[in-house]
Image (cartoon, rainbow, N blue to C red):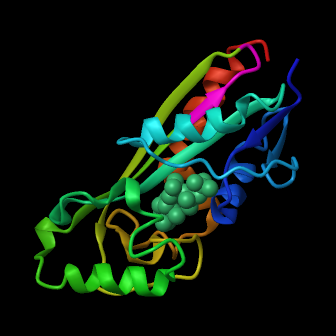
Amino acid sequence: MATRIIFATGNEGKMREIREILKGLNLEIVSMKEAGIERDAEETGTTFEENALIKARSIAGLTYDIVMADDSGLEIDALNKEPGIYSARYLGEDTSYDIKNTTLLNRMKAVPEPRRTARFVCALAAILPTGEELVVRGEVEGRIAYEMKGKYGFGYDPIFYLPQYGCTSAELLPEKKNAISHRGKALTQMYKLLSEREI
Ligand code: ITT
């Protein structure tokens, strides 16, 4: 019987959101670091789903707990869906998000409003102690803003404008972002799949 979910991520921003969204499950949610596991799986997949599974599989053999991982990113239609699965690696893993976001805003400068469509995607993989693998996907549609705004969230949130809320996802309070985000949607689907199983 599993008592914990170990989330295979080194991203603290993701981890905060995951804890908040899954807090209703009667399972302890811990990061790899908290579980004392150090792994940095090479993301060699060509889709969000493949990479989520690669990350989850990289630690699944090391524990009897449930293992989960997400692979997520921002797809900008006018930039041929860049940065996409390379969102964390765009301009280099260690480059600040101020620079990444400013560069994307500059690349989008001449793009007119109707063509500024974009979405956040989150593929979420879980591997159960039985070996069963589950993968779900959540998406949220939005637009690329004209300037960075907001202090919540992380990553590309300051340039992701949500027309239905009239603000960027970095301006939304965390509970609000989790209620509508790609990660929130994927985790809600996974929550349902897990609740249907004896875990
Ligand atoms: P792990 O692989 O260790 O989980 P990572 O940050 O490398 O951490 P990904 O490969 O899935 O994770 O890259 C996701 C990137 O996409 C993330 O670093 C952000 O740049 C961006 N991103 C994903 N979800 C986001 C969100 O909710 N808000 C803002 N940016 C997001």
Left or right for 21, reference 187 = right
Horizontal and vertical percent for residue 17?
Answer: 66, 56
Q: Quadrant of residue 133?
A: top right
Which one is nearer the viewer's eye here, 21 or 67?
A: 67
Please say whether residue 177 is visible from this viewpoint.
no
Q: How many marks?
A: 0
Q: Is residue 146 magenta?
A: no
Q: Identify which residue is drawn at 34% across, 56% down.
A: 84
Q: Residue at x 18, y 85 (%)?
A: 109
Q: Residue at x 39, y 80 (%)?
A: 101
Q: x, y (%) of residue 126?
A: 63, 30
Which quarter of the rendering shows the N terminus?
top right
- Residue 126 vs 91, above or below: the answer is above
- Tell me where residue 140 appears, x and y as whole percent: 39, 51
Instruction: Identify whether 68 is placed above or below 139.
Output: above
Would you place residue 134 above or below residue 176 in this image?
above
Q: Nearer the viewer, residue 112 or 30?
A: 30
In the picture provided, is 140 more to the left or to the right than 151? left
Q: Quadrant of the C terminus?
A: top right
Can residue 23 be seen from the camera position used here?
Answer: yes
Looking at the picture, tell me which residue is in the foreground, 62 or 148: 62
Residue plotted at (59% across, 42% down): 55
Is 126 a magenta residue? yes
| Range of magenta residues | 125-130
Of residues 120 and 70, the one nearer the viewer is 70
Percent position (x, y) of residue 89? 45, 66
